[in-house]
Image (cartoon, rainbow, N blue to C red):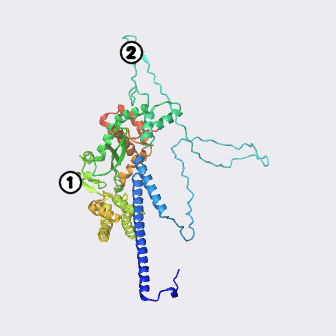
Amino acid sequence: MKRKNHALPTDVPALQALVLQQQTLVAQKQATIASLHDDLNARKSEIDRLLAQLATLRRLYFGRSSEKAGRQIVQLEHRLEELLTEEKVQHAPVDGPAVLPALRPSPVRRPLPAHLPREERCLEPREPACPACGGDLKPLGGDVSEQLELIKSAFKVIKTRRTKQACARCNVIVQAPAPSRPIERGIAGPGLLARVMTAKYAEYSPLYRLSEIFARQGVALSRATMAGWVGLCSNLLAPLADAVCDYVMDTGKVHVDDTPVDVLQPGNGKPKTGRLWVYVRDDRNAGSRLPPAVWFAYSPDRKGAHPQMHLAGFSGLLQADAYAGFNPLYEEGHIREVGCMAHARRKIHDIHVRHPSPTTDEALRRIGQLYAIEAGIRGRPAEERRQVRETRSRPLLMSLESWIREKLTTLSRQADTAKAFNYLMNHWPALCYYAGDGWAEIDNNIAENALRVVSLGRKNYLFMGSDSGGDRAALMYTLIGSCKLNGVEPEAYLRHVLATIADHPINKLKELLPWNLTIPAE
């Protein structure tokens, strides 16, 4: 309420006292406002921190079943909800006309595969004569449609009877030799074993679930029985995985990455964190016609001694992230470090998603220009790629480096953007190496893509039963992953290999590698 002028005191001391009182009241209100402002900034800072932690946890544990990570995410979400409720954060509707969703084009139905068997049915009109006038009917073409049907998988029992014959003169008994089996004296044939292995490692179905599926078909196979089959088949296929390893390391460039897996500790009941390492040989982006392959290896921890042992006989380009365990290999001189631009870009992108700014937008735009050049030369010969990179990519990289160093002078060292930029600068030579070598890649996505099979599998099982289970998983991921890279159907491959490997000469083992094998049609 405004004070009326006639109510003001007329003497100077009274006026001075009134002014002093008003100044004190204003100062108190300003202090309260400053305190509220500080509290608001603190809450906003905590909200930003919680959002960043949530985004990181969701990205790191995407596709992975982790009770601990789930609890962390729930706790952070509850705290974030409390803060937002206290601040009464409301999302107002965006002004402006409503934007209609883009119309999706009608999907085009692809023709059914030509190699599938066809069952043809011909439907004739029921009426022998014209239903309108009773006249004779004559052929006039017809309509043809196809329907895809599924034949239920079925078990069958193969009974092998070996007759005996005796010589009437010397009493010698003659009998055909028993055919070899993948598992000696085992009841499982190659097709059943291939189904179990494919379901577990390519379709991510735990054995208990597979046991339930077989039970519905009238066949009782316990999880323990199938687990024993997995172990015996792994021993049988181990030489093939070793041959894949030799092939992967016998090249001038390898992509490397790793991912965590939960492994049950004997006698403890609690899982530990093991590691699956992936090594990929794939030069198709550089125009190579040599077949690609992938080799997995398991280790009980992430110590650098494991990849150092895996790469003991390798020399050439090692495309990987900035894991410190690789540093001794680079210091020896026979392995050259090649960085991953996608890994560096991801750090900037995560910040841009939370707090978009002109700086992060410009950084992503500049890196996007480098990827646009790569898209245009993918599959071209290595020398052609090198020339294009020297002409077009190298100047962009130099400009990007200068721009980042200039931005770092204006950013706080504690800012997330500065930390992301410092990561690029700390690994800049490795990130730029690809520009002078047509065989190298701009990033390590080839290895990251190979690890997706593990990430998808973690959604369906809680942990691996033991370290030996990790070794078996690495072996099967090796064969199945190499099949997929070469366009070979994994189950058909395993069925054929399990049926023949016991009698196959050991010196001709390479004939059974996925890219060398021609699987006969059934």
Tell which residue pokes out farthest to the left in this image.
332
Tell which residue pokes out farthest to the right in this image.
133
Pick the residue in front: 142 or 30: 30
Secondary-structure class at tag 2:
strand
Answer with the quarter of the image where residue 162 lies.
Answer: top left
> Whole-percent x and y of residue 426?
27, 61
Residue occupied by mark 1: 331
Q: Mark 2 belongs to which amino acid?
A: Ile
Say whether residue 60 is left or right of residue 136.
Answer: left
Residue occupied by mark 2: 173
N-terminal of the pair, mark 1 or mark 2, is 2
Of the numbered discs in the image, which one, if any, rests on residue 441? none
Q: Can residue 275 be seen? A: yes
State how far apart marks 1 and 2 are (Cα): 69 Å
x 50%, y 34%: residue: 214
Residue 234, compared with residue 76, is above or below; it is: above
x 30%, y 45%: residue: 301
Answer with the quarter of the image where residue 276 lies.
Answer: top left
Pick the residue in front: 268 or 492: 268
Q: Mark 1 belongs to which amino acid?
A: Glu
